[in-house]
Amino acid sequence: MKKMNYLVAIVMTAMMSITAIAQELPQPSPAAKVEQRIGLTDISVEYSRPSRKERAIWGALVPYNEVWRVGANKNTLITFSTDVKVEGKDLAAGTYSFFAIPTATTWTIIFNSNTNGWGTGNYDKANNVLECTVTPISAPKQESMRFSFEKLKDNTGNLVLAWAELAVIMKIEVDVEAKAWENIDKAIAEVTDENKADVYRNAAKYTVSTKKRLEEGLKWINASIEAKESWYSYWVKADVEYANGNKVEAVKSAKKAIELGEAGAKESGKPFTYKARIEKAITEYK
């Protein structure tokens, strides 16, 4: 009897394996994922891509004035690693299911908190976190529905949905500066002897690019140099001093950067390629 049960178990396992293999088939709407970083915000869209197949899409396969799951199979999911604005409206960091209500002239874009749905079966307007209105535009024909990110800048980018002969553009804005300062403050709070020179130097450099917290920037670059001298740190110090209005000290620091850079180049046997750029900066400081 034990031998019989053992044989049955083997047969059942084999049948399950065959079934699993048989289920791995090409899908008419294959899964896809697109990811993009805007500033310091990571955004991903996971969706299934239906194809047109010579069918009429808008107002036909996708009816007007009805909630559409935007894609096929399970709900499209959009994830934001930080708070963002979509079409000027605030949206908190997190993962959302993505729906739309198309019409012939405008679309209502919907971000919903229920992320475990299939189609529109579990859609509940009560779970809508954000709704915004956009206007579709004519676009080159797209056989398979596609999400993409376009016109990227440090703090903005467009999420584009294209299918058939239409495209819908959603502007996404991120507060990259606030996130950068958050990262800086966290890094400084957790600074160690091993990374002190880099952490303080990077923080000081950011004060120059933003023209904010410049006095702290001077303290940070001095702490960086105290931890470890380098030609690059003195060049950053020159920029910080210049931004603080101290031109004389900026020139001194820049000359020190050249001195250290040339000494290091002589030791390594390689030319100091940044000398001309620092000399140009000295001219600007003066």
Image (tube, grey):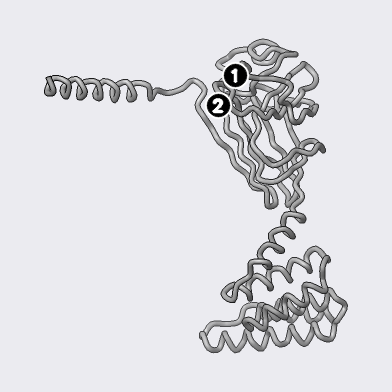
Q: Is residue 236 above or below residue 41?
A: below
Q: Residue at x 69, y 15 (%)?
A: 58
Residue 255 position in % (x across, y down): 73, 87
Viewer-closest of 233 and 199: 199
Question: Which residue sits furthest top?
Answer: 60
Per the image, the residue denoted by label 1 is 119
Q: Residues within 10 Å of mark 1 (few under 14, many from 20)?
A: some
Per the image, the residue denoted by label 2 is 48
Residue 94 position in % (x across, y down): 66, 39
Q: Is residue 278 above or below residue 209?
A: below
Count of numbered marks? 2
Q: Tell me if label 2 and label 1 are in contact, CB under 8 Å.
A: no
Residue 110 position in % (x across, y down): 73, 27
The first of marks 2 and 1 along the sequence is: 2
Viewer-closest of 42 and 51: 42
Which of the 4 image quarters holds residue 218? bottom right
What residue type is disc 2 on? Ser
Eye-nearest disc, 2 or 1: 1
Which of the 4 image quarters holds residue 90? top right
Real-space Cα distance between discs 2 and 1? 11 Å
